[in-house]
Amino acid sequence: MKITFMGAGSTVFARNVIGDCMCSEALRDSTFALYDIDGDRLNESHVILEAMRQTKGGYGKIECYLGVENRKEALRGADFVVNAIQVGGYDPCTIIDFEIPKKYGLRQTIADTLGIGGIMRALRTIPVMADFAKDMEEVCPDALFLNYTNPMAMLSGYMQRHTGVKTVGLCHSVQVCSEGLLKELGMEDKLEGRKELIAGINHMAWLLEIKDKNGADLYPEIKSRVAAKMADPDYKNKVRLDYINHFGYYCTESSEHNAEYNMFYIKSKYPELIDRYNIPLDEYPRRCVNQIESWKKEYAELLENGVKDHERSHEYASRIMEACVTGVPYQIGGNVLNTGHLITNLPENACVEVPCLVNGYGVQPCRVGSLPVQCAAMNMTNINVQLLTIEAAHTLKREHIYQAAMLDPHTGSELDIDTIKKMVDELIDAHGDYLPKYH
């Protein structure tokens, strides 16, 4: 078996996913093909993963492929392809995505999924992933593409609609959603045996049902504990709890993400909301700087002290591969095309996040039915932006970028149309060769 990791210079994540595969008896004998365009980072990943492979008994082998000219060989014959690329990196592209909108009075927190930052990230990533797809259609047409790169719904949706590659989008937030909520609210005694239903879109999927091991609905108790948390000035997860107050349901992704997915919380006319909801503006650039420095220190320590044994993480990737190979079923929350109206009150061409059964036949999405109307309405404010961004990438029409930005809830609530178009033009110019030519 061959497992190819695109963007293997993301060493921490590659270590988790490939380390998980090394923990699986069904996967450990695989060839692990590491691909990246940064030689230094690729080498760091190779050093760490080779050491990890030895601690796991020396099963399988690791191959490295550097640069676009070797991409097709990295993919050739792959059974599974894991995608974790970041086109343009922190410097220059993430910096551009934050600093230019800030000039126009538009503040962001993460800017990797929605908003003007998410739009730009999608537009520079889709062409690269389209090239991956062309290579895969030629050299590994039956491979399953596991996408971890954000903006998840835009990138996965593009691959699902405009390529022949079997694609599922994977996010960390579904696995930890209800556990995190119950722990924060002091309801740890309800964790064991709980049952849940989560569906919607990536980063805004809804915890539609949560029951204890006896089938009792936990939402009444959850709602009774929200007020105390909202009154705590130091509590950081207030946006998501505010969703419970106003929309009736908790959502999967963090408050710092969701603060910028709507028109409610980051408002120049109401600056007091930033403190009230503990919204960390410019959070992602801070994380990038900290992660870069932290990894330098960690890598030096690993070289000096050796690589410790790896314990299997909560990431879906190895579990999906294992289920496909062994036929033993496994359930995930996957990002798939809404074909056949898995969620009946969202569009068929939207990428939705729903429960999926994985077995020897691959990823089988499950029909959910309709979302509560207010949850579907919130999702649609994001889906509008996602569909228009995909259309822009597919047609190369600049007008669709303008429209995506205009209809973005946060951008449209803060800026007028002329300013939005001016900001988009400046962003396109600043990203230069990272973007194709839009007309």
Image: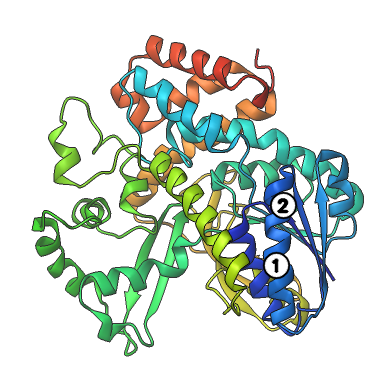
Q: Which mark is residue 42?
A: 2
**Which residue occupies 74% across, 85% down?**
25
Write down the residue under mark 1.
49
Quarter of the image for residue 104 reads: top left
Q: Earlier in the sequence, mark 2 or mark 1?
A: 2
Q: Identify the amino acid type marked 2.
A: Leu
**Which residue occupies 68% across, 56% down?**
44
User: x and y percent of residue 236 in the render?
Assistant: 23, 55
Quarter of the image for residue 30 reads: bottom right
**Which residue occupies 33% across, 82% down?**
191
Give the vertical position of 354 relative to 414 (above or below). Answer: below
* The N terminus lies in quadrant: bottom right
For the residue pair 329 and 133, the one nearer the viewer reads as 133
Q: Identify the amino acid type marked 1.
A: Leu
In this picture the colour scheme is rainbow
Q: Is residue 146 visible?
A: yes
